[in-house]
């Protein structure tokens, strides 16, 4: 399976394609993809929610729910969230299932600004 870099248009394969897919899934608000309204994540609904234990669990659940539904090549093992004003900073780790290679993404930001 191969994809395309959202900034350059270049072809992506393997881990690079997986990273791009994860970013696309988590940074797409539910209900915004034409013909696929259930694609994306609930994270945008949680950006301004209280970041207590319950809020953190809701973020973890939204990440895992979206990735389990839309990205079968990833087995999520850990999600970290840090609340910053108007945004969520995520770090996640897991395994790239086809090769059993560990994966870590440290710099994923979800905010209420329009995605381009």
Image: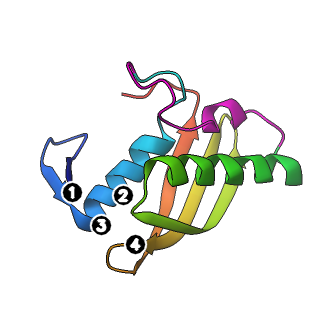
Helix, strand or loop at disc 3?
Answer: helix
Residue drawn at the location 79% of the way across and 35% of the way down: 49
Cα–Cα gap, marks 3 and 4: 10 Å
Tell whether 104 sits left or right of 16. right
Q: Nearer the viewer, residue 111 or 97?
A: 97
Residue on which disc 2 sits:
19
Q: Which residue is mark 1?
A: 1
Residue drawn at 51 percent across, 48 percent down: 69
Task: Say whether disc 3 or disc 4 marks the residue closer to the N-terminus.
Answer: 3
Q: Residue at x 62, y 36 (%)?
A: 42
Q: Is residue 30 above or below residue 59?
A: above
First to last magenta residue range: 34-50
Along the viewing direction, whichever of 12 and 109 lies nearer the viewer: 12
Real-space Cα distance between discs 1 and 2? Answer: 13 Å
Would you call the spot at circle 1 few (<14 residues within 10 Å), some (14-19), or many (20 or more)? few
Residue 30 located left or right of residue 23: right
């Amino acid at each position: 399976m191969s994809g395309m870099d959202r900034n350059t248009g270049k072809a992506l394969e393997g881990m690079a394609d997986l990273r791009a897919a994860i970013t696309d899934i988590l940074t797409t608000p539910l209900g915004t993809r034409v013909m696929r309204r259930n694609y994306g994540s609930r994270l945008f609904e949680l950006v301004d929610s209280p970041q207590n234990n319950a809020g953190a669990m809701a973020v973890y659940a939204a990440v895992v729910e979206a990735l389990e539904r839309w990205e079968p090549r990833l087995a999520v093992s850990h999600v970290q969230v840090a609340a910053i004003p108007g945004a969520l900073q995520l770090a996640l780790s897991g395994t790239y299932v086809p090769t059993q290679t560990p994966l870590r993404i440290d710099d994923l930001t979800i905010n209420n600004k329009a995605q381009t």
